[in-house]
Image (spheres, helix red, strand yellow):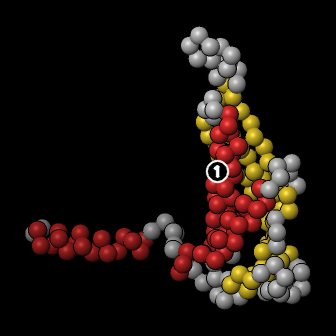
Amino acid sequence: MTSHLICRIVIALALLLPGLACGYQRLDRVPRTAAWMKKGETVRLARFKNATRKLGIEESFTKALENRIVAASPWTLVSQGSSSRWVLQGTLEKYEVRPLGLSLGTGGVKASAGTASRIEVVVVASVDLLDGQTGAVLVHRRGLTFSNQYRLDQNFASFDNRELLVVESLADDFAESFLTQLLEAVE
């Protein structure tokens, strides 16, 4: 075989092999048949219901989902009192803060021994997509669970501040994940 022939075979294989892939396909090239996928339709985001004991976290989740809808969805977001083609409503079902690690104390000071050194925040939410005209539930996502951890320093004044940052991070993760599941689902 000549090197010229080998070169042609290599080029032919390079061109043919991508077509013989393992069934993967780009999601942006898959036709969408779901009614809620039409570009320009209106959506109203109902306030999140907070069924947890942590006051105010629903604000972070509502705001994160609003931002994600505006940035990365085919919909036009309308205000709370407006009528819309679609309605998203969610419930925060669980908020849990749990210690993951314990401090053994430092040096000669053992007073901090047994205090939490690492914290995990867990949030569980459910979201429904409703037909804004009939009120029928089209999509129900239950038990969406998100968690994040952070190290707790001995400056306890920063605890609430760090926890708030973690909640906002979880809200962003939730909004991105939920909309991706909803909008990229291949039927």
Amino acid type, label 1: Leu
Q: Residue furthest left?
A: 2
Q: What x and y, as percent, mark residue 181?
A: 67, 67
Coordinates of residue 112 in the picture (x, y in percent) = 67, 20
Q: Residue furthest top?
A: 108
Q: Residues within 10 Å of mark 1 (few under 14, many from 20)?
A: few
Q: In this view, does 166 lie above or below 130?
A: above
Q: Name the foreground residue: 7 vs 120.
A: 120
Comparing 170 with 15, the one in front is 170
Q: Which residue is drawn at 64% across and 87% down?
A: 39
Q: Is residue 36 something that shows in the picture? A: no
Name the residue beneath numbered marker 1. 165
Residue 174 seen in this snapshot: yes
Q: Does 34 sit above or below residue 26?
A: below
Classify the position of the C terminus by image quarter: bottom right
Give the quarter of the image for residue 184.
bottom right
Quadrant of the rendered structure where residue 150 is? top right
